[in-house]
Image (spheres, rainbow, N blue to C red):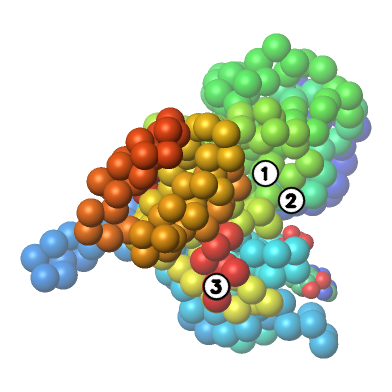
Amino acid sequence: MTQDGALSGVSPESSLNLHIGCSALGARRSSLTDVTPATARSAGRPVAQPVVATDGLTKDYGSVLALDALTVSVGHGITGLVGANGAGKSTLIKILLGLVPPTRGGARVLGHDIATEGAAIRATVGYLPEHDCLPPDVSASDYVVHLAMMSGLPRVAARERTAEVLRHVGLAEERYRPMGGYSTGMKQKAKLAQALVHDPRLVFLDEPTNGLDPAARDEMLGLVQRIGRDFGISVVVTSHLLGELERVSDHVIILDGGRLLRASRTDDFLDATGHLLLEVLGDGGQQRMIAALVAAGVEAVPKGSMINVGSGAGVHDLIRDTAADLGLGLVRIQIDHRRIEDVFADA
Ligand SMILES: Nc1ncnc2c1ncn2[C@@H]1O[C@H](COP(=O)(O)OP(=O)(O)OP(=O)(O)O)[C@@H](O)[C@H]1O
């Protein structure tokens, strides 16, 4: 890094491209028009303005229809944007950042129109792109300082803020090493740090768990949760794994072939199915228990090593008595919840 904050070996032009690819461009938040969410009054209760609202958003790349008349609203908190590969998630994010124009329709992000206010959006929104975009011979520290300065922070503040975000994402120790030697998990953390360095109000995280092993994936999901819950930054996070985001997101939007399949609170996806799950201990316990319950007129089928039992009046007593009659140990009875995968499969 040179004295003026430019990365050595990175030309101003490539540096600009790098920033467009890996972060949000533009002035510092403090220099922006105030876009503090207005609280509209509706039926006497304050209603927060959505952080993102799209209206008939359509994008075709020639013969490929990536987004098909998408109308959806995203509130504050953590929103999981899920869908199979090619569902249109990345296209949607790039359009919302004002980097790719839609073919038809429009959208507002934090109150800004994507058609005319792309720079203002990128100044107040952080972006973790899906693909690797990190210069291999630059350290995470120099890289994030550079992008912080491009966002308008003075050098000293940029350094302080960089040290802070790199510590938050767990890259404090490795921050002076060239990123080319980083593991996939470390690279994702560096991309996350640059998305946060300019103190955004909203971040788009495009597949932040891509390529991570289970431990690194859990760590990244924990970071996503902290960003949303502890730092109060609204998060839109994508995944092609439908179940992955259910434990961290407040809302889930499911895209399928560029169309909106469903959008609702995560809890609503996971509503109780009205069934119970039980686990019994004993020789041939699962089959014997199922046979006895079915003989008593209760719906009972295996579910993995557990038994899925239709709920109803007196069923708890019946389960207890049946287990006792058969000499089986009753390990647990719990309410069976749907998973996002189940909802998707039913759609
Ligand atoms: N620049 C482009 N030119 C042509 N087709 C494109 C372009 N970008 C995306 N597509 C196509 O648009 C569709 C949606 O792609 P998009 O990358 O938005 O999906 P996605 O849900 O993010 O999936 P993935 O996680 O695999 O990137 C796909 O069929 C993709 O091949």
- Indicate yes or no: mark 2 CB to ligand 1 under 8 Å: yes
Vertical order, 260 against 217 (above or below): below
Q: What's the amino acid at mark 2?
A: Glu
**Discs 3/1, front:** 3
Vertical order, 172 against 140 (above or below): above
The image shows a total of numbered marks equal to 3
Q: Nearer the viewer, residue 209 or 322?
A: 322
Residue annotated with mark 3: 346
Residue annotated with mark 1: 208
Q: Horizontal and vertical percent for residue 347? A: 55, 76
The residue carrying pointer 1 sits among few (fewer than 14), some (14 to 19) or many (20 or more) residues within 10 Å by Cα, namely many
| Farthest left residue in view | 44
State which quadrant residue 271 falls in. bottom left
Q: CA distance from mark 3 to mark 2?
A: 29 Å
Of pointers 3 and 1, the one earlier in the residue sequence: 1
Label for residue 130?
2
State which quadrant residue 43 falls in. bottom left
Q: Nearer the viewer, residue 47 or 270?
A: 270
**Discs 3/2, front:** 3
The residue carrying pointer 3 sits among few (fewer than 14), some (14 to 19) or many (20 or more) residues within 10 Å by Cα, namely few
| Kind of element beneath mark 3 | helix
Is residue 250 found left or right of 95 in the rendered image? left
Q: CA distance from mark 3 to mark 1?
A: 27 Å
Q: Nearer the viewer, residue 124 or 136?
A: 136
Vertical order, 172 against 336 (above or below): above
